[in-house]
Amino acid sequence: MSGKIRIGIVGYGNLGKGAVKAIQQTEDMELVAVFTRRDPENLHIEDTNAKAEHISKALDYKDEIDVMLLCGGSATDLPEQTPQFAKHFNTVDSFDTHAKIPEFFAKANEAAAEGKKIALISVGWDPGLFSINRVMAEAILPNGENYTFWGKGLSQGHSDAVRRVEGVKNGVQYTIPSEDAMEKVRSGVNPTLSTAEKHRRVCYVVPEEGADQAKIEETIKTMPNYFADYDTEVHFITEEELQRDHSKAPHGGFVIRGGKTGDNNNQIYEFSLKLDSNPEFTASVLVAYARAAYRLNKENQFGAKTVFDVPPSYISPRSGEELRRDYL
Amino acid sequence: MSGKIRIGIVGYGNLGKGAVKAIQQTEDMELVAVFTRRDPENLHIEDTNAKAEHISKALDYKDEIDVMLLCGGSATDLPEQTPQFAKHFNTVDSFDTHAKIPEFFAKANEAAAEGKKIALISVGWDPGLFSINRVMAEAILPNGENYTFWGKGLSQGHSDAVRRVEGVKNGVQYTIPSEDAMEKVRSGVNPTLSTAEKHRRVCYVVPEEGADQAKIEETIKTMPNYFADYDTEVHFITEEELQRDHSKAPHGGFVIRGGKTGDNNNQIYEFSLKLDSNPEFTASVLVAYARAAYRLNKENQFGAKTVFDVPPSYISPRSGEELRRDYL
């Protein structure tokens, strides 16, 4: 009995790996096991005290794990796993298919209520920290407008689109917030801005030998939905340069609210993230919210919850007394 | 019975006036009365439905006011008023004497517990929103450092110091975050920075006729504690320019945390405010948190609370369903 919060991880992709590292940075949590659909024998977990187990063994750990971090994808993993696991464990997931959140919440809520557990859904930065700031900024400044800018960030979907272009051997795409649009928002004029007006797109492309670079550039820049509406740049580089300069997964973005109070006074509220590693940061948010899931359940709360339901103090390892004395 | 949350305001300085305007921007609150130590006959309240009352009449409104916003100062008003009012009303205050918060909390807690009310203390932006971000950023990125920069903002204490200099007729002082220091922090190097290294000071001074400007500048720039350690600029202007360009009370600032995850990846978390009117914004935060005080008490919670104890959804007028659908 270490007295620590005992954590399990389901799924060992980039997010699961980030979670292992994030747990190691805490003093009040320990990793018990990582569950995988692959052969657990082949799993190399950096935390040597944790076990690698096949996902089918998860229920054996019902009494040994306080919170299960569900680190699978939103397309197919989480819609199945969250309701399944929430019957038996407190869970935290990063479900991020915005349009399906109400449906996902309902299913998670039913399962967690049945199991008298907490299912903390859609945790991360967007959804997650960005969502909190959208809600708080509006509550404080009702007369105003919210703006979300994404980037500078590597976009998986747009990088895939670039790589599908004929003559492209490899490539990445960065979404970059438009400085002009951001400055307009920060000035308090609350402009009307489309997603295309808020962002530009920069591609780094490795062409196949002998490929027609002008044609590649033209094809990318005129690609409907993905690039045609955007200010798009295409740069040609070598495979070595791509590996050297573009192998990380940076991301980030801005939530800005311009509001007016009283006699037309502009009040600008801004939250931003600049992340070298998107999965490691998202995992760090999941790990912090595991504390909240654990504490809420200890108070005999159960059912599905979101970041909107969690007081800031619940994600901190510090006592209320310490927070008031040193952080307020 | 309007079904709205019924608000009272104690104190009608800049903060109280800002609260009147902030309540007018909400749809779920109404202002019942403003309480003053002055002659209420002389109070001009912009909300014509609200009464002006002497502070001694407050208890008569025990059943007509759901939340009392205490808009007095931290030096002498709030230490007396919060414990007094919290026995009979849910209260929200902006107590901001950081060093005395634990003691203030204890007294507010005792009074609110006795009255079975909520006393939400130290609400605003610092303490308040900045505090939330310091706690959340650290919880998410335990391996890192928090930085707070204030400004660009009018500092009352430093403006007073300028005005006390011989030969100065009038003047204001702005605290301005050092761009160099901010860029260093944003780069993720987690530098060691003193308050003086993080800020510079800019003074606009109206000299008395025939005053020695060089001597005024020298006196200001070498003033111990206030200016000597800082990069300080002094500009001489006319009384007309001062009234025209420097009559607002802008403020703001930045909370930045540089943290590291995994293999030395920099993760930069940043929150900032740029406020044309400091008292109007602070009042808007108090008003939003009045919702939380009301709701917490409806759930039969009581005692002193801080922003750390309040889930984001509690300050929003929207339902959980709406927040999940449209803001998550």
Image (cartoon, coloured by chain):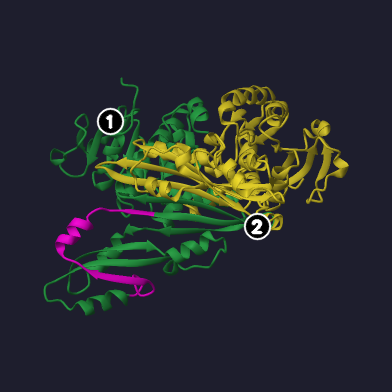
Chain colours: A yellow, B green
> Mark 1, mark 2: which one is toward the viewer?
2
Q: Of residues A321 and B31, which is closer to you in this image?
A: B31
**Point 24% across, 39% down: residue:** B35
Query: What amino acid is found at the position of numbered circle 2 in the picture?
Result: Asp
Q: Is residue A92 left or right of residue A11?
A: left
Query: Which residue is identified by label 1?
Result: B61
The crowd level at tag 2 (other Cα within 10 Å; few <14, some 14-19, many 20+) is few
Chain under callout 2: A
Q: Mark 1 belongs to which subunit? A: B
Identity, as a three-letter code, of the amino acid under mark 1: Tyr
Say which of A62 and A57 sits in front: A57
Residue for badge 2: A245
| Circles 1 and 2: CB atoms closer than 8 Å | no
Labels 1 and 2 share a subunit: no
Residue A234 is situated, as x and y percent measured from the top left of the image, at 57, 49
Picture disc at residue A252:
none
- The answer to whether A125 appears left or right of A283 in the picture is left
User: Can residue A322 be spotted in the picture?
Assistant: yes
Please identify the residue farthest to the top as the structure is shown: B1
Along the line of sight, the residue nearer the viewer: B206 or A91: B206
Q: Split into 4 quadrants, where in the image is the N terminus of chain B?
A: top left
Tally of numbered tags: 2
* B240 is within the stretch colored magenta: yes
Q: Which region is colored magenta?
A: B224-252
Give the SS element for disc 2: helix
Quarter where residue B150 is shown: bottom left
